[in-house]
Image (spheres, grey):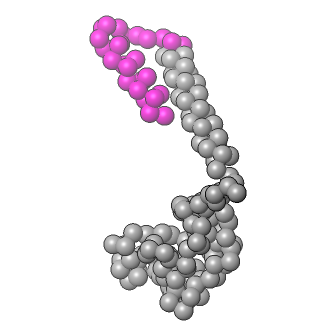
Amino acid sequence: MKKIKKVVDVLNYMVKRQNLTHVSLRNYSQAIANAQRSYWGELRKRYERVQEITDDIRPWIVVDDTLAQDSNGRLTLPSDYAAFGNLTHDSGKELDIVKEGAVSYRLYSELIPNTTSRPFGVFRGSYIQVYPTSGVNGIELVYLKTPTDPE
C-alpha cells in the first residue's frame, strides 16, 4: 500500500508541477493499478523466498509437546535446541515471551493478568521461566534443532 500512496503522491506532484488542471481518471486509475501489480509482484517474490527457506530448514524444525513445568515453573530447553520458533499451551494458545525487563510489569499487571489462561515466559539461559509457575498445561515448543554431524 505504501507503493500505491507513493504513486498517488508522484501523480499529484506532476499535476502541480506542470500546472495541469486535470488528469484523466483513466490515466490516474491505470497508474495506481500498475503500482498495485508491481507491489504484489514484489510481495510474491518475498513470500516465495521465505517459503523456500522454510522448506529448506524443515528437517531441523522440531515440535516438542513433552515439556512440562518443573516445581519452579521452568521449562528446560532440549539439548539440541538452536533457535526459538514459538511456544503454545492448551491446544494452540500462544504463550507470550517477554524480555527480562517486562517480567515485573507482567507479574503485577491488571491489564494483562498473570493467569494460567494468559501465561507468559522469559528466556533464562538453558530454560524458559513460565509464569504462573504452575498450572500451565499442554505446553508445546517449536524450535530449530542443532544439526547432528553426519556419520
85, above or below 42, in the image: below
Rendering coords of residue 149 (x, y %): 63, 57
Q: Residue at x 67, y 70 (%)?
A: 64
**Where is residue 82 drawn, in percent x and y?**
54, 62
**Up/down of 12 relative to 52, above or below:** above
Q: Given the current orientation, which residue lies at the most extreme bottom position?
A: 71
Relative horizontal placement of residue 132, taking residue 17 as reference (left or right): right
Q: Between 145 and 112, which is closer to the camera in this rendering?
A: 145
Which residue is pictured at 38% across the width and 19% down the height? 10
Please report the residue visible at 66 percent of the width from the left and 45 percent of the height from the top.
Answer: 56
59 up-or-down from 64: above or below: above
Residue 111: quarter of image: bottom left
Q: In which image quadrant can residue 20 be found?
A: top left
Depth check: give the residue in front, 32 or 142: 142
Residue under the point 55% across and 30% down: 42
| Residue 103 inside the magenta-drawn segment | no
Q: Is residue 3 magenta?
A: yes
List x then y, in percent, for residue 21: 36, 10
Query: Who is closer to the viewer here, 45 or 84?
Result: 84
Report whether residue 150 is seen: yes
Magenta span of residues = 1-27
